[in-house]
Image: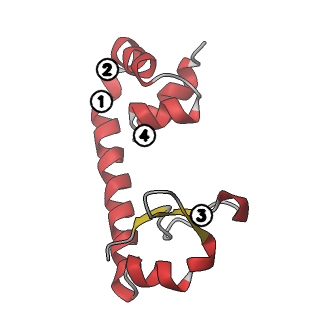
Amino acid sequence: MLEKSKVKELYIKGYTATEIGKILSSNKKTVEKCVERNFKEFKSEHSIKLYERRDCKKAIERTNNQFIGNAQLVKWNRHSYITNDSGTLIFDKSRGQAPGDLPTRYKVIY
């Protein structure tokens, strides 16, 4: 059962239906229906917060990439990655959670 109060709280904070679904371990469609039925009046607040969250994320990524690119960052942290069958580097979850500025997947181009 989906808790409407938590959906409302996250929706007003600017989270998308997919993100809310992951947080609450629910289906995206279920969250979309709940928002559509119960929280139409909060759409403007949601839109403002959504753009704020996206702008902050872009600014952080831009700042991080300003000093060192992803390719160089992966080279410096190669010990934190494992290679799958197709040659893609994937962050090794046994080392803990990946930091926000470290790519979790990186396709090596030769």
Position of 40 with respect to 73 (left or right) is left
The amino acid marked with disc number 3 is: Ala
| Mark 2–mark 1 CB contact (< 8 Å) | yes
Which mark's residue is nearer the viewer, 3 or 1?
3
**Which image quarter: residue 47?**
top left
Residue 78 vs 97, above or below: the answer is: below
Q: Which residue is mark 1?
A: 43
In the depicted structure, whether residue 24 falls above or below residue 101: above
Density class for disc 2 (Cα within 10 Å; few <14, some 14-19, many ≥20) is: few
Q: Amino acid at mark 2?
A: Lys
> Is label 4 in a helix, a strand or a loop?
loop
Instruction: Please state which of residues 92 and 98 is positioned toward the viewer in this rendering.
Output: 92
Q: Secondary structure at mark 2?
A: helix
Which residue: 56% across, 78% down? Answer: 78
Q: Residue at x 39, y 79 (%)?
A: 71
How far separated are the C-alphas under marks 4 and 2? 15 Å
- Closer to the chain start, of discs 4 and 3, is 4
Q: Amino acid at mark 4?
A: Tyr
Q: Which mark is residue 40?
A: 2
